[in-house]
Image (cartoon, rainbow, N blue to C red):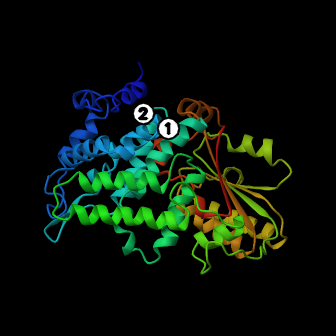
Amino acid sequence: MDEWTSLLSLIPREPDWQIPWDGWKATDLHIWFEKMAATQQNPLWHGEGDVWSHTQMVCEELSAMETWRCLDKKQRQELFLAALLHDIGKVPCTRIEDGHFVSPNHTAVGARMAREILWQDMGLCGTDEARTFRETVCSLIRYHSVPAHILDQSDPERRLFKIASMGELAADFSIKLLCILEEADMRGRVFPRIAESVDMVRLCAELAEEQGCLNGPGSFPSAYARHAYLSGRKIQPGQDLYDDTWGEIVLLSGLPGTGKDTWVHENFADLPMVSLDVIRKQKGISPLDDQGPVAAFAREQAKEYLRKKQPFVWNATNLTPSIREKQVRLFQDYHASVRIVFLETTWEEQLRRNKNRADEVPEQIIRRMLRNLVLPERFEAQRVEWESV
């Protein structure tokens, strides 16, 4: 039995729904459990103490919830693994500030850590099924704290629509699952206001249901209107807009060695391409050197096409939201529509293809890039797709 199959066999199931904690501690995840046990939390919110104690309580609460038990097997597995890893980000993020334990940004960091574990250690990559499972877990971790604090958001409805839109890409993800996880998170702690927090989570679910985005992505009259609303334009979700874009720019995203060049040749051979790899070769710049001149030259190339209203492919790794946002803004400033395509393959194939490249990227660099990878989210452009190659 491989490690992944072994993990799935430890998830509670009927008739007794018991969690075999000794079995979990015998898995490769035990290293993280030990680090969680050594990570303390603010006693005002977590009277139970360390992160591992809290995590066990959350998993016990989740496995006892009828809303979790009545889900299909795959969703139960995704939710349980999300609960098991939901606060893993507190391990690197926790520090003492003004005499209190704080862990800023631990949900985003935790989602990236979970992605690295599931992708690299468990082999959940390279197929649509594996990616859906992995990214459902990671999205649940990324956004698990939102439901209990939904009214703290400046625009709660828009926030829910943005999060729910992930269901278009990770088909198992929904606000409903997110609220189940967060209710277990609130119950699985020693805290004087648990009932109030659970009520807030349920209010979040009611709000999402009213907006039509509890069980899946909300509906919009067009892709253009969806992106306008999700990116913050002051319109209503059902309001349609005139699409003034003249054509589509394809922005690729993926680790080195994924096969982006091959994918472009097979799908967009008729379009010009702005390739950072090609520019590096032309300029004699190593991938390990300062990439500022490469990016600047690429943007000038892109502007030439944009001024001509010529669709093209932007071929680079584009692994983080901030990098993608910079390119998307440039394209949209010229009134182009943007299609982001994220490509992935299996880890073994990734390394094999990379070794066959003329400009091989050191494996430790690819591992570091995977550690920082955030897949494109649905709200980042008019069209966003994830593909296995």
Question: Which disc, if any, is residue 202?
Answer: none
Q: Nearer the viewer, mark 1 or mark 2?
A: 2
Q: Is residue 328 left or right of residue 290?
A: right
Q: Amino acid at mark 2?
A: Asp
x, y (%) of residue 280?
A: 66, 53
Residue under the image location 22 percent in, 28 percent down: 22
Residue 108, picture quadrant: bottom left
Front residue of this view, candidates 60 and 104:
60
Extreme residue in the bottom direction: 234
Q: Is residue 293 left or right of residue 66?
A: right
Extreme residue in the top direction: 1
Q: Residue at label 2? A: 121
Q: Residue at label 1? A: 363
Q: Residues within 10 Å of mark 1 (few under 14, many from 20)?
A: some
Q: At numbered mark 1, what does the secondary structure look like: helix, strand or loop?
A: helix
Q: Is residue 112 left or right of residue 15?
A: right
Residue 294, picture quadrant: bottom right
Q: Amino acid at mark 1?
A: Glu
x, y (%) of residue 54?
A: 21, 49
In the rendered view of the protein, which quadrant contains the C terminus?
top right
x, y (%) of residue 239?
A: 68, 75
Q: Check the image and report above or below for 347 versus 223.
A: above
- Quick one: label 1 or label 2, which is nearer the N terminus? 2
Quick check: can you spot residue 119? Answer: no
